[in-house]
Image: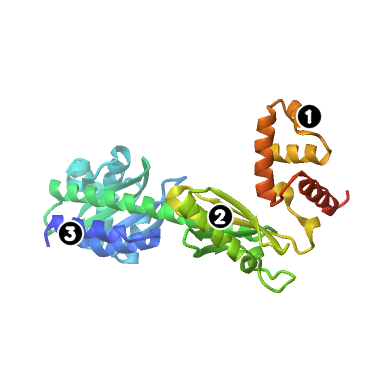
Amino acid sequence: MSVATGQQRLAASLQGALTEAEVTKVYLSAVPSVIGARGRGFYRFDASSATPATVAADVSPEFLADYEERGRCGDPVLNFVRDNLRPVDDTRACPQRVWHSSSVHDVLRRAGFYHSLEAPVVVSGQLIGTINFARAANDRPFSVADMRAASAAAEQLGLAVERALRFERTGARATMLEAALDRLPQAVVVTDLDGTVRYTNRAAARPSVSGNSLLDLASPQIAAALAAFREQRHRIAVSSDGHGQVIVKSVRLPEDSDAALTLIYSCDRGSASLPLWDLLSPREQQIADWVSQGLTTKQIAQRAVVTENTVKQHLKRIFAKTDVANRAELVQRVWAARQAQPQK
């Protein structure tokens, strides 16, 4: 297999690795086809101290332990890579007399090795590790072509580690977010625009007084909202089930997600539990409150320092969101919601 083919195989294999552990395993499996060597390793550094946090290699544990004890400190090849962030081998890192007198040379010799090649693995401009190769005394020294191949392999490995870290961070954030949503008393549902449920929190699956879950009760309203999103390009839809059991508010998520978020409000205890304020913006809440106080459109406009037409537009949106037909019904629901609030 040619080096170019080996590099393509390595890149393709790393592309499919999702976690850092998978990246490391794939790398050690595929890199032999890129650079010929008797020993290969990947040293992953600790972010704060730049010392090895993990080591994955196809050499003996005894050699790895001996290298950590006697070879790492003063390793000319490693020091060059750290200082210059580019690959190097033992014939180019320092004068040969320095190499032959170094403790790392003795560590390699005792394990049957002689030549060393290392390349830096960099993620977001930071050195996060090295890849290492070792050959025996009767093997040819590492060449410039070998260093180029090591540089390419290290670059591919760095990109794969960066992807894996991003994937793992995303997974951790998603787990944390799901745990937070499960603690909400509010039912939350995420669907795609075709109606397939992608996520529900615990409140959405909890049975209501009728015995059905809030998601079951709200399914027709969710379906209607999704149809409006697909066909009429609406972004928000608010409706009730007509039986006083639930109020549903669906919001279309950004276009590239092709999904919708739905909040389901339970009305099991009647109109007194209408979640009025959750449905309205702060400005709409203020106007609804003024309506409940008996103020006219003109008086509300004067208080809000807006035109009467602006107040009328706000009222239209308030009526739609709270599923009422006129000011009288709105007043009833505002007062019912207030009566349902716990007394302090």
Q: Which mark is residue 283?
A: none
Q: Nearer the viewer, mark 2 or mark 3?
A: 2
Circles 1 and 3: CB atoms closer than 8 Å: no
Residue 305 placement (x, y as % from top left): 71, 25
Q: CA distance from mark 1 to mark 2?
A: 36 Å
Which of pointers 1 and 2 lies earlier in the amino acid sequence? 2
| Residue at point 45%, 45% (across, down) | 49
Residue 193 placement (x, y as % from top left): 48, 58
Disc 3 is placed on an element classified as helix
Residue at numbered disc 3: 6
Residue 290 placement (x, y as % from top left): 79, 37
Residue 172 visible somewhere in the drawing: no
Residue at numbered disc 2: 261
Q: Quadrant of residue 224?
A: bottom right
Circles 1 and 2: CB atoms closer than 8 Å: no
Residue 182 placement (x, y as % from top left): 64, 61
**Amino acid on which the number 2 mark rests in the picture:** Leu
Disc 1 is placed on an element classified as helix
Q: Nearer the viewer, mark 1 or mark 2?
A: 1
Q: CA distance from mark 1 to mark 3?
A: 78 Å
Query: In this image, 181 relative to 55: left or right?
Result: right
Q: Which mark is residue 299?
A: 1
Query: In this image, 139 relative to 210: left or right?
Result: left
User: Above or below — where is 308 with respect to 116?
Assistant: above
Query: In this image, 282 relative to 179: left or right?
Result: right
Residue 145 visible somewhere in the drawing: yes
**Amino acid on which the number 3 mark rests in the picture:** Gly
Q: Quadrant of residue 64?
A: bottom left
Disc 2 is placed on an element classified as strand
Which of pointers 1 and 3 lies earlier in the amino acid sequence? 3
Which quarter of the rendered picture does the N terminus lie within?
bottom left
